[in-house]
Image (cartoon, rainbow, N blue to C red):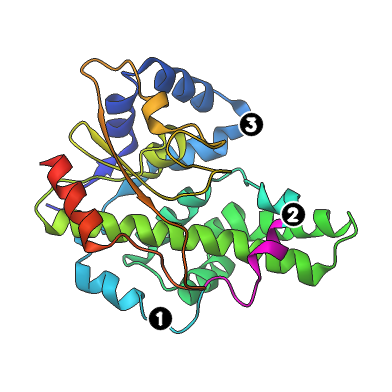
Amino acid sequence: MSLVTTALEVAKLFVAAPDARHKFNGWSTNPRRRHVVKHVMAHRTETVYRLSPADMEVLLHQEGHALGNTVGTQAREIESIDRWNPAFAFTHVFHYILESKGAFPTWDDARAFLQSDETARSMLWDPALEKIQEVCREGWSRERVEAAVTWRVGNFYYSFLREIYTVVLLRAAGLDVRVHPLADALFRADAWCGRTVVTIYVRNPQYRDGRVGRKQPAESILAGADPPFSFHAIALPPASEFGEAHLPDDNEIQKAITAMR
C-alpha cells in the first residue's frame, strides 16, 4: 500500500498546541472559507512520497522559468499584488496540481493545468484574472500587473519546488518526512518527521528571517504542545541566480538529517 497523509492526521498531530487549535477552529468554522476547508480537509498527500531525487533533478533543468522576464523590484512596486493572497493558499494549489498529475510539474505544465483544469481555474487562474482587472482600475498598466502576478505566482512555484526537493532528499536518506497543505498553510510546518517540524525558507527580513518578519513562525504557532515539538529551520541566503530554483546545499541537507535522527 502507498503511503498517505490525510488532513485529519495533520489536525490530530498539530492542534495539541493551543494557538494551533485556535487557528484550526477559526479557519475550519469560517463560513467564507467553507469551500477551501472542504477541499483541504479532503486532500490526501501521496505523490510526494513516490518521488525520487532523480525525478527532482530533472526539474532543475527545465526550459522555461516561472518568473518570465519580470524584474522583481518593479513587480513589488504594485503592493496590492505583492501582498495578494487568494482564498486558496498557493500551497493548496500546487499540492492539488502535484496530486492530480501524479508527478511534480514543470512550470509550463503547471501553467497549462491552471488554465485547463476546472478546479485549478477556480482556485487560482480565475481569481488572478479578477485581481488583474481590479488592480488595472487603480491605474496600473495591464502589462505591469500581469508581470507582477507572474512574479508572485512564479516565486511560490519555486518555493514549492524547494520544499518538495528537500523532502524527497530527506526521505531518500531514510527519514519518514511528511507534508500536507493544511500543515504548511495553517501551521507553517513545511514538513515534519515525528515531532520535529521543518521550515524551509529564503531569508528576507520583510517576510521571514529567523523570528523577524510578518509571517508568524511555526515555533510560535506550535508552542505549548505536550509533548513539545522540536524545530529545524533550513534558512537560505537570498538567491543569486535569476529564474532558477534556490535549493539547500548538501551541507544544509546533512544538518537536517542529523537534526531529525
Q: Is residue 165 left or right of residue 216?
A: left
Q: Nearer the viewer, mark 2 or mark 3?
A: 2
Residue 3 visible in image: no
Q: Residue at x 69, y 69 (%)?
A: 147
User: Residue 216's mark?
Assistant: none
> SS of the residue at dot 3?
helix
- Residue identified by numbered label 2: 131
- Residue identified by numbered label 1: 62
Q: Residues within 10 Å of mark 3 (few under 14, many from 20)?
A: few
The location of residue 70, given as percent across then percent down, is 65, 72
Looking at the image, is mark 3 or mark 1 earlier in the sequence?
3
Dot 2 and dot 1 residues touching (CB under 8 Å): no
Tell whether position 75 is magenta.
yes
Dot 3 and dot 1 residues touching (CB under 8 Å): no
> SS of the residue at dot 1?
loop
- Residue identified by numbered label 3: 32
- Mark 3 and mark 1: span between their CA atoms? 38 Å
The location of residue 5, given as percent across then percent down, is 26, 43
In this picture, which residue range is highlighted in magenta? 66-76
The location of residue 13, given as percent across then percent down, is 27, 27
Looking at the image, is mark 2 or mark 3 earlier in the sequence?
3
- Mark 2 and mark 3: span between their CA atoms? 18 Å
Tell whether position 33 is magenta.
no
Q: Which is more toward the observer, 88 or 160?
A: 160
